[in-house]
Image (tube, rainbow, N blue to C red):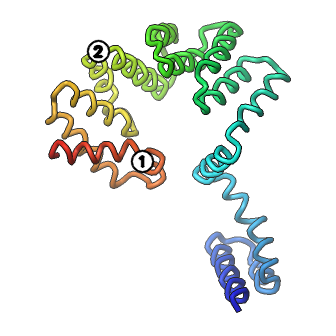
């Protein structure tokens, strides 16, 4: 009996999906006649391809694979690098190592990519700046940032501003960091810059200014997709806890 109920439930779900997505109505007959086999065929042909294109599903798949086989990306990058020692493959190798927090090794690959580049490649230099920040090598990170040519998309410029501000924070230059964070505050679509701005203001003793920004984050949170909140759970949790702590 449980199998019959399960079969009927899956058939119903597949039929509803077929109708809602305006798929070929012939599937409905196949699902009814084929029972579980019909449902499996429908899932493979109609549902699975859509799932593979879904960014959130791909992210979950990547997390699961990362937990089961954490060295998978490094092995794949190593094989690709063995076939062709290119700038792109060196960057991919460095990225895979960074995912495993092996920043010193990643830095070596980024330096090789830099030596292979015929010009000051922003993609290479941003990675050098990022990994040097992780290693606490602030001067080297700032030197890499300074070499990045002006221009690029607004998003690229924002990323450079955020990274430079973070480096200034590490140097203890909160005023310089705050100036850069606030420069891009209004044009930033995410809440990372707002959280960082609030944190700097708190360190500088400006609880009122920090509380104002944290309240804005809470307001924006109500209209933020749950997937985004889940991906940044620690950040949003810090914002809410800090707002409660300072009496906002």
Q: Earlier in the sequence, mark 1 or mark 2?
A: 2
Residue that appears at 67% across and 22% down? 91
Callout 1 secondary element? helix
Q: Is residue 83 left or right of residue 225?
A: right
Does 83 appear above or below 142? Answer: below
The disc at residue 160 is: none
Q: Residue at x 34, y 47 (%)?
A: 237
Residue 144, compared with residue 212, is above or below; it is above
Residue that mark 2 sits on: 173
Residue that sits furthest to the right in the current view: 83
Q: Residue furthest bottom?
A: 1
- Residue at horizontal 27 percent and vertical 50 percent from the top: 219
Tell me: 154 left or right of 110: left
**Residue depicted at 32% across the width and 21% down the height:** 180
Quadrant into which the N terminus falls: bottom right
User: Whole-percent x and y of residue 226?
Assistant: 44, 55
Relative image position of residue 189 (x, y in whole percent)? 39, 38
Point out which mark residue 233 bears.
1
Place residue 166 in its image quadrant.
Answer: top left
């Amino acid at each position: 009996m449980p199998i019959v109920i399960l079969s009927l439930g899956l058939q119903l779900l597949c039929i509803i999906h077929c109708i809602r997505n305006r798929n070929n109505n012939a599937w409905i007959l196949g699902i009814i006649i084929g029972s579980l086999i019909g449902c499996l065929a429908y899932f493979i042909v109609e549902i699975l391809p859509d799932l593979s294109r879904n960014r959130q599903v791909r992210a979950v798949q990547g997390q699961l694979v990362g937990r089961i086989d954490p060295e998978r990306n490094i092995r794949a990058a190593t094989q690709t690098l063995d076939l062709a020692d290119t700038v792109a493959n060196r960057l991919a190798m460095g990225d895979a190592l960074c995912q495993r927090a092996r920043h010193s090794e990643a830095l070596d690959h980024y330096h090789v990519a830099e030596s292979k580049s015929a010009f000051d490649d922003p993609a290479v230099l941003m990675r050098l700046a990022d990994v040097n920040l992780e290693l606490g090598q602030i001067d080297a990170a700032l030197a890499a940032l300074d070499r990045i040519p002006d221009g690029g998309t607004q998003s690229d410029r924002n990323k450079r501003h955020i990274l430079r501000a973070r480096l200034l924070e590490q140097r203890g230059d909160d005023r310089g960091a705050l100036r850069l964070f606030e420069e891009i505050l209004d044009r930033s679509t995410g809440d990372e810059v707002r959280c960082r701005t609030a944190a700097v203001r708190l360190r500088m003793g400006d609880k009122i200014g920090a509380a104002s920004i944290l309240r804005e984050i809470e307001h924006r949170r109500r209209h933020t997709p749950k997937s985004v909140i889940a991906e940044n759970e620690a950040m949003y949790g810090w914002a809410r806890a800090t707002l409660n702590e300072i009496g906002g």
